[in-house]
Image (cartoon, grey):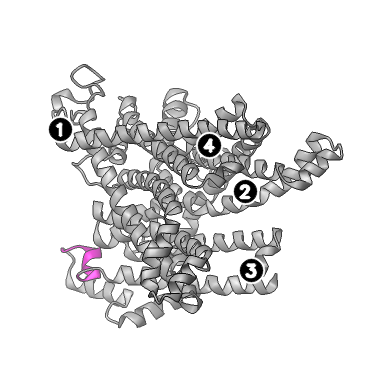
Amino acid sequence: MKQQRKRSRRVKKRSVSFTLGIVIVAVVLAVTVVGVLYTPYDPIEMHIADKLSPPTWQHPLGTDSYGRDVLSRIMQGAGNTILVGVVAVSGGMAIGILCGLVAGLAGGMRDEAMMRVMDVLYAFPAVLSAILFSSVFGASLTNCMIAIGIYNVPIFARLTRGSVLSVREEEYVAAAHAVGRGRAAIAVHHILPNIVSPLIVQGTIQFAGAILAEAGLSYLGLGTQPPFASWGGMLREAQTFIGLDPLLAVFPGLAIAITVLGLNLLGDGLRDLLDPSFIRSY
Amino acid sequence: MIAYAFRRFLSLIVSCFLISVLVFIVMHVIPGDPAQIMLGTEADPSTLAALRDQLGLDLPIYAQYGAWARGVLSGDLGESLRYHVPISKLIASRLAVTAPLAIIAILIAIVIGLPTGLYAATHRGKLGDYGVMALSQVGLSIPSFWLGILLMLAFSLGLHWLPAGGFVPWGKSFIGALQSLLLPAMALGLIRAAVVARLSRSSLLEVLGRDYVRTARGKGVHEMRVLWKHALRNSLIPIVTVLGMQFAALLAGAIIIENVFYLPGLGRLAFQAIGQRDLPLVQDIVVLIAVLVVGMNLIVDLAYALLDPRIRLE
């Protein structure tokens, strides 16, 4: 009884962080949507006379070295960041799940070959792939998305393969085989719905990772290209004027940290909801 | 163990071969004439022809790969187009910055993360535990390069304790070199410390719930002895593994951090090589870093197999 009460208290505490995660992510998404439709000022229009202004009523987060409104640029940057996260993670997830399903169901040499290819892709952190692509095709937001997407492929492939191996001997899969359903139908209708929970949780965690990666690549100039705003790019510009206006380096970093924090809390909460056995180790 | 190590080593060789092929293919699907792209549109035809000859661009692609791979295996990585020195020398000189940076960062992660995680585990459900967990959650959400900028603001521009950037060569001043690396290593290491703290907490909590720990407690063994002799040793295995696996993330972080602090390391060299269109240099650095990552994964696997014999039997 005492154990149950303790566990229930832990679950409640975890649901607090889950709720906090949802609230933060909802606010970030709201800012992103509003930023697409409306910003207080044009995020790319320069007003040199107003450069490096501290926070005022007109510019609540100040202006940058070109006199552009920092709040408007953070709002525009949110859109670019979320776009990269969604495209890179969903692309990497789709390809990774497909590879993991094929490897897990085929087994034998095909499984071995697929996993060796995944090992190779896993050796390329997003920034390394971005350096490779940028040197060949030039720096762009598209190459940034491809680099982050490639990094996500082996992560989802390994997770899917592991999950497939754990369920492929289950009775409902054997029953589907017995009634003559094909491999593809079994994978889509029977296996995938039963392994979707860990994939959703991993997707949330990878989304947070993609935002950090995009920020890092934009800081290096390999992501969103000027004059369009990105949180990482704003930090790069702010560093040049760090002695004159330290606040410029604070707000974009806070935007990244708050968004990633929200996604991490949401990921943790989802894991507890979808896999209650995990809570036992806490 | 030897058979397992041999199998894993064979797998490493296959991975290294595939990495080299993949990078080589990506570098050679470049649209247009690579020599023209490297030298620019103003380059005269004789210089272009000399570069094509130097890089073997007129040969079929498999012959180009063969020549490059033979060079790499014999330690000849070719010559940088911009620095006009052997790439192997250039990389070795830059590794003298990146390797110590990574080592200091890992040490910071262990020295801060491990005791913090153990403290949280032994004070489970108390204020200190929640504080550590909250701080580590924040640590996981901060990009290391932003933390680097904040540390620069505080310790360089504010307190004037440490340099804001640049690197004093090891030969000139050992202390100066360490000072140059301290802030970037802190930026990388503090983020890893959050990972280590969370993992060591959950790993120790899991071990503390095991039967042999309950037995030791039942026999009246002192709590400190239970913790240090029975629980900690076993909980360290997954922590060592994850630390090894963090290597890739650390190298990726180092590429960015070196640019924040203007450190002449491998990451900054790769970044500058993109701007200078020094494609052979980019190619060699990318392959080297990818091979380092798979090599580190092999070491982690072998260490794990050594610590846990069940792994070898799978």
Q: Which residue is mark 1?
A: A38
Q: Is residue B35 magenta?
A: yes
Q: Chain of mark 1?
A: A
Q: Which residue is mark 3?
A: B314
Q: Determine whether the residue tagged by mark 2 lies in a helix, strand or loop.
A: helix
Query: Type of residue at label 2?
Result: Ile
Q: Which residue is mark 4?
A: B179
Q: Is residue B110 above or below residue B273?
A: above
Q: Is residue B177 above or below residue B301?
A: above
Q: Chain of mark 4?
A: B
Discs 3 and 1 lie in a common subunit = no
Q: Determine whether the residue tagged by mark 4 lies in a helix, strand or loop.
A: helix
Discs 2 and 4 lie in a common subunit = yes
The reply, left or right, for residue A76 in relation to residue B306 is left
Residue positioned 59% across, 24% down in the render: B127
Q: Nearer the viewer, residue B18 or A100?
A: A100
Q: Quadrant of residue B115?
A: top right
| Residue A171 spot, x, y in % from top left | 51, 67
